[in-house]
Amino acid sequence: MEILDGKKIAAEIREEIAQKVVEIKNQGKKTPHLVAVIVGNDGASRTYVNSKVKNCEAVGFKSTLIELPDTISEAELLNKVDELNNDDDVDGFIVQLPLPKHIDEEKVTLAVKPAKDVDGFHPENLGRMILGLPGFLPATPAGIVELLKRYKIETSGKNCVVIGRSHIVGTPMSILMSRNTEVGNCTVTLTHSRTQNLSEITKQADILIVAIGKPEFVSADMVKEGAVVVDVGIHRIPDDSKKSGFRLLGDVKYDEVAAKSSYITPVPGGVGPLTIASLMLNTLKAIDLK
Ligand code: NAD
């Protein structure tokens, strides 16, 4: 079994981006600028956003964190999005999800200008992904594709099973794995909450991508010997023995599934760092699309 080391690959990508940023600056061009908007005080969301901002600074980007109270109205947030859409200094921006219940996430996603939508959530970018046109790929699925590519995992003609059909992970993932591209050409099965006999399907998977959002849901008996397993899940489990007060678990029972896999992503250190790396790759691309 080999670990798909997301931390290592993300560090390589950061190094490549940092070099490109030096070139951009040497050409007298403007420093790429990513803005992250966070609404409210959710601990996990804050950790993700802070990590995004820190990573941007590490590669030489300009990055700005806009913190808004959870009392902000939908109209005020939409005004902020409009302001960022029209600010020439901003190359790309993200609005960290989830948003408080009184704000319609769909409205906010639709309000982001597609050319600055570095999360790749806008329908225009999702449509471009389906047609293979230039645009922003959703960060987490794009990060997984990059990880498979850099580990030279053969995907062509393989059976790929995706668990979960969210708009940000499972659904775009299933599309990317079925496209006629270097990482792709799989026969894809997208499974979800209404799927019958799930483990009969997952046992057929040469590549199993798990984004169900349930801690340690996938056990060894659901996995084929020698499968490639990608665990997208992240869960904070209270743990007094840790300084942080919690430990992180994925959607997969790591030890027993790792013993059966050819390759597997750990949690933490698997998909998470690649999501941030893709966000930065998208920001680099945004300079040309703006
Ligand atoms: P989600 O809750 O939006 O979607 C879960 C999906 O699982 C749904 O589509 C549902 O149909 C499906 N599902 C539920 N029960 C099922 C069952 N019994 N059988 C088959 N399918 C079932 O989740 P999401 O936003 O896609 O996130 C999934 C996980 O990935 C979460 O733990 C989330 O925290 C994590 N995540 C990680 C990253 C990262 O960067 N590593 C990014 C995004 C999400």
Image (cartoon, rainbow, N blue to C red):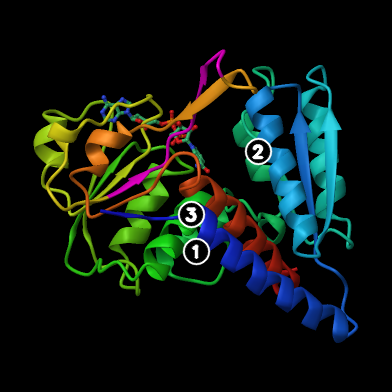
Q: Nearer the viewer, residue 278 or 82?
A: 278
Whichever of labels 1 and 2 marks the residue nearer the N terminus, that label is 2
- Give coordinates of residue 229: x percent, y percent: 29, 48
Query: On the image, numbered disc 2 is attached to which residue?
Result: 48
Give residue 254's quadrant in the image.
top left
Residue 23 appearing in the image: yes
Q: Residue at x 68, y 71 (%)?
A: 17
Query: On the image, numbered disc 1 is attached to which residue?
Result: 128
- Give coordinates of residue 74: x percent, y percent: 76, 26
How far apart marks 3 and 2 lie (CA) works out to 16 Å
Q: Amino acid at mark 3?
A: Gly
Q: Amino acid at mark 1?
A: Arg
Q: Nearer the viewer, residue 207 or 7?
A: 7
Query: On the image, numbered disc 3 is attached to which residue?
Result: 6
Whichever of labels 3 and 2 marks the residue nearer the N terminus, that label is 3
100 lies above or below 89: above
Whichever of labels 3 and 1 marks the residue nearer the N terminus, that label is 3
Determine the residue located farthest toward the bottom in the rendered image.
Answer: 27
How far apart marks 3 and 1 lie (CA) works out to 26 Å
40 lies above or below 162: above
